[in-house]
Structures are given as structure tokens and as C-alpha cells.
Image (cartoon, helix red, strand yellow):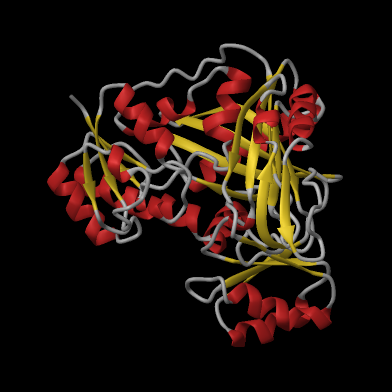
Amino acid sequence: MKKLLILGASVLQLPAIRRAKELGYYVGVVDMNPSAIGAQEADEFFPISTTDVVGVVKVASEFKPDGVMTLASDMPMRSVAEVCLVLGLPGISVDTAYKATNKAAMIQSFSDNGVAHPWYFTVPDERTFDEVRRKISFPCIIKPVDNAGSRGVVLVHEMSELDTSYAYSRGHSRSGEVIIEEFLSGSEVSVEVMAVDGTVHILAITDKLTTGAPHFVEMGHSQPTRLNSDQVKDIEQLTKAAVCAIGIINGPAHVEIMVTDQGARMIELGARMGGDCITTHLVPLSTGIDMVEATIRVSCGEIPDIAKKFDKGSAIRYFRVPKGIIQEILGTAAATSIPGIREVTITRYVGDEMTDIQSSTDRAGYIVAQASSAEEAIVSCETAMEQVVFRVEGPLENMKVQDE
């Protein structure tokens, strides 16, 4: 029996833990929280932080896995890469892991390899900030170099907002370093990728819906993209160039791109599967490709099955909930009964306080749908969302949740 080490025991990692066990792997799971939902489903559990590189390598050296992976988290990729190096396992290099988890190193790699990207300034400290501030044009985006989930991301419209925005973004940076870059406008997409022996396979292109300024938190996704064939070709070419620039030879990638009037431009990428149910739900619902299984297989040095089985549409939409204390949640059963709905998940509960959505952790749940086209899947999602009511205490109480 082959052994697989999975970094993370949160709900994000459950699809990998469960699928690996279904496939007959002996599964070890690493997480600092012994009460995490995936801990009880592991064959062996190790209470170590997924970002404790030394600790994870020690665990792996004792567990002796045939492969190591994490599903949709960025920073544990550094631990994954170190384990692969020390144990000689398939996977990404330490250099690639760094480029894929540090936005400054990432965009520098794009620049070095001729991959289209926005203008940018890396700002490691306040002295550098003072030096570059007069070179900045507006609007621009400031974001931490080493965080995810839209944490610390902010749009800056003019010079008067710059100092406050810099402080906000820097406060979400583990290292204190941020990146200031051109604000790109257009159609935002993500691209789900599997690299096998250096060949980049594009599995799906996902249209994205966000909150917009100032934080651009993702509130919905749908597949396949509704962009035209020329735009799709441009996206595919840019994706392959970006994945190669970072150095991903074997394994998944989640690539984020803005299609502008001047063509496709890179935003950033992760050397792992995409989150927000994109790769765990939308890809299999729209293509029939089991990307979780493919990632497991690749991490263990096996050849994955990434052939498309069918062409359908899939979509996810996240709830928008008024600010206040949740008093009651109604209508989930009615939402589930809508044709095409595959999942209704609530992540906030009665008694929880809802605030403005500034990162992905502020969302209250989601609905996933499958249909014959992306358009029909989106309609199913939005119809189902109209059935769900979050009653909150406060001036906006009793407002119905709708996907705006």
C-alpha cells in the first residue's frame, strides 16, 4: 500500500484525504490543530504546523510517504518542496515553491521570462515606500507578498489614500513586504492546470466574479469561460509561459489572469489546486476530470488521467449577508431542491457576527450548480440563492441574501 502525506486537516483538505483513502492509499495528515475536521479521518495524524518546514520534514522522514501534497493552500507548499528535496519525492523544487508563494519573486520571474504582467514595485520597508511613492500612478493595487485569500489587498485611487492603504496591506504581510502594482481592468479568469513531465495541460478556464473595489474578494466562479476563442488562445499561451517561468514540471497550478484591452496579463499563480471549490467541484462537474485524484497520482509519481469526459457547465456563488448578528437562517432545503443544484453549504451560524467582506474568510457559505452550460448553471445558483434568507440583528435585519 502506497503512503501519502497531506499537509492540512481543514475542510479544504478533506477532498484529498477522502479521495486518497478511497483509492487505497495509507494517509498521514499534518496540522497544528488536533481538532481539525480531517484529523479524525487520517490513518495517522501529526500535530505539527503545515508551515513548520523543519517539523514537517522530520514527520515525513519518519512516515516515509511515496508522495506529499496540499490541496489549496499556498504557504504549506514550501514544506511540500522541502520534503520532496530531502526524501527524493516527485513534486516542485524549493525554488519554485518560493516563487509561487512570494508575489515579489513571482512577478520578477515573469519579468525575467517575458511573461506579460502589470508594472510593479516591491516594497520591503518604509524607506523603500518613501522612495517609490512619487513613481506610482493611480489607480494601483497594494497587496502583501506572502498572503492569500484577498487578505491585505486594496485598491488605491489617489495619493491621499496611499499611506493608509500601505499600512493596511503591510499589516497583513508576514514579512512586512508588500507589492504595489498596476490596476488591471477587464475580465478576470483563473486557469486550472496540470503539468506532467514538463508539459502544461490546461483543464479548464474559469470566469470569476468579485466584490470589486477595494478588496476584490471572489464571490463566484463558472466554467467553461464565456470569452471568445481568440481570448481563450491568448489565455492559454500566457498560462503556459507563466507556469514554465515559475518552474512547475509535475503537479497542479492555479493561474489568475486579467484579460484587458491590450490582451491577457498575469495577476499571479499558485503551484497547487485552486480553492473556492473550483478544482474540487467545478472542474469535475464541467469536464468529468477528477483533479484531486490527478494531483494525488502525480505527487506519488504516477501518470494521472486528465482526459476530458464531457462538456457541461458548472458554477458557484457565495452568499452576501448584511452586517449584524445572525438570528436565523432559512430556506436551505428549498435551495437544494432547485434543479441543477449540487451543494448548499453554510459556513456561518446563528450567533455569528457578519461584517463587510474584506477577505474570503468573511463569506457565509456557497451554492454549487451543474447544467448543460455555464449560463444555465449560474441561473440555477442565483435562483437557489433567492431561497435562502439570513435574518440578522441590526438596521439591515430581515434583508434577503441575493447574489448581486
Picture layout, residue 303 above or below residue 112 = above
Whole-percent x and y of residue 91? 35, 39
Between 312 and 378, the one lying in front of the other is: 378
Picture layout, residue 252 above or below residue 19 = below
In-image side of 248 versus 232 (left or right): left
**Residue positioned 41% across, 31% down in the render:** 295
Between 94 and 388, the one lying in front of the other is: 388
**Residue positioned 56% across, 71% down in the render:** 172
**Residue positioned 79% across, 53% down in the render:** 398
In-image side of 216 versus 53 (left or right): right
In which quadrant of the rendered image does the N terminus lie? top left
Picture layout, residue 123 above or below residue 23 = below
Give the total of numbered labels: 0
Whole-percent x and y of residue 24? 26, 22
Whole-percent x and y of residue 99? 48, 55
Whole-percent x and y of residue 401? 77, 46
Residue 371 falls in which quadrant of the image? top right
